[in-house]
Image (cartoon, helix red, strand yellow):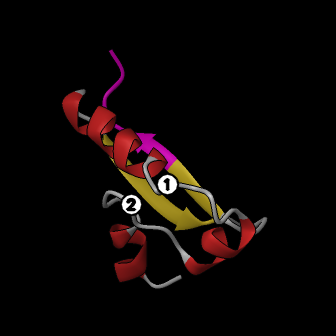
Amino acid sequence: MPAEQLERLLERRERGDDARRRRPEGMGLGLHIAKGVADRHGFELRLAPSEHGGLEAAFMGPLR
């Protein structure tokens, strides 16, 4: 998945084509909510293709 598509997945109600086919009833809110939580706590949410298929999401930031 190209980087510009990964960034778009963080927008409210945005879903990838594979996710729409696999679970058409999804709302596209999960990554948007996770991004909001990360932002509020000074973290960054990074998305990348997983070596096992699908998407990998990681919170990056300082540990207290």
Residue drawn where x is 46% and y is 85% of the image: 2
Rendering coords of residue 47 (x, y %): 47, 60
Nearer to me, 62 or 38: 38
Residue drawn where x is 44% and y is 50% of the image: 31
Q: How far is disc 1 from disc 2 in space, using C-alphas?
A: 6 Å
Residue drawn where x is 31% and y is 32% of the image: 37
Q: Which residue is mark 1?
A: 27
Q: Which residue is mark 2?
A: 13
Mark 2 packing: few (<14 Cα in 10 Å), some, or many (20+)? some
Q: Are marks 1 and 2 in contact (CB under 8 Å)?
A: yes
| Segment colored magenta | 58-64
The kind of residue on which mark 1 rests is: Met
Q: Going by the picture, which residue comes out furthest to the top?
A: 64
Nearer to me, 56 or 8: 8
Rendering coords of residue 43 (x, y %): 29, 37
Give the quadrant of residue 21. Answer: bottom right
**SS for dot 1:** loop
Q: Which mark is residue 17?
A: none
Q: Quadrant of the C terminus?
A: top left
The answer to whether residue 6 is above or below residue 4 is above
On the picture, is 56 further left or further right than 38?
right
On the picture, is 9 further left or further right than 36?
right
Rendering coords of residue 7 (x, y %): 34, 69
Residue drawn where x is 41% and y is 79% of the image: 5
What is the count of numbered marks?
A: 2
Rendering coords of residue 11 (x, y %): 31, 61
